[in-house]
Structure formats: C-alpha cells, structure tokens
Image (spheres, rainbow, N blue to C red):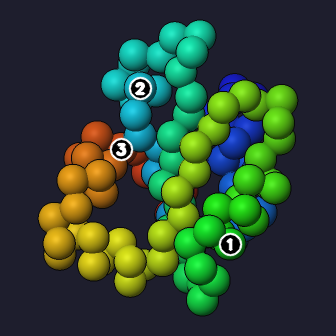
Amino acid sequence: MNKVDKVVKCLMQYDPEKIIIFGSYVRDEMDEYSDLDFVVIKKTEKRFIERLIEVARLIDLDLGKVDVFVYTPEELERMIEWENPFIERVLKEGRVLYEKE
C-alpha cells in the first residue's frame, strides 16, 4: 500500500463525503520535500479548526507531511460561487480518490 492509499485509509475513518488529492503529487512534481495535499468534504456542524484537529489525530505521523483541509458541502458550494482561487485550483487539478454514493 503506497503513502496516498495509507492516508486515504486514515481519512476514511472520518466518514467523508469526498476526498480529493491535489498539489505536487497530482502534477507529478513530488520530491523529498513535498507534502501530500487533500481536501475532504464532510457534513458536520463543527468549526473549521475543530475539523482540522480531528483529522490530524487520524493521520499516522509516520506518513510524513500531510495537509488536509476539511470543508462542508455548503462551504464548498459557497467557495465555488465566490470563485475562490484555492478551491478553483483544487477542483481543476485535483483528483477525487473517494466519493460517497
């Protein structure tokens, strides 16, 4: 199992709606200093910082540097409406690794 699969396995414990990987991994520009970047979509009432803490506790420290941003479906829609450059880049270059049916 590769590093990305291991991170996805950890993130699945969070019961996400969707997991998207983006950044240097998707662009095939990884080097020894690169991290793995993920956006997770999850239905929740928790605040953004609380979500980040919850996800950080799930990621195995042996997996190295992993950045995970957790948004609700409503936040994602709002960012799309507002043409948020970060979310536009994630949706344009990112790859969906998991989507709840």
The residue wearing badge 2 is 24
Q: Is residue 59 above or below residue 5?
A: below
Apparent side of residue 62 relative to residue 46 in the rendered image (left or right): right
Q: Is residue 40 above or below residue 1?
A: below
Tell me, for residue 63, which label it has, or none: none
Residue 2 in percent (x, y) is at 69, 26
Q: Of helix, strand and loop, which one carries label 1? A: helix
First along the sequence among labels 1 and 2: 2
Q: CA distance from mark 2 to mark 3?
A: 10 Å
Disc 1: CA contacts within 10 A as few (<14), some (14-19) or many (>=20): few
Disc 2: CA contacts within 10 A as few (<14), some (14-19) or many (>=20): some
What amino acid type is highlighted by mark number 2?
A: Ser
| Residue situated in front as seen by the camera: 80 or 10 | 80
The residue wearing badge 3 is 94
The residue at the point 74 percent across, 38 percent down is 6
Find residue 27 and report its image quarter: top left
What amino acid type is highlighted by mark number 1?
A: Glu
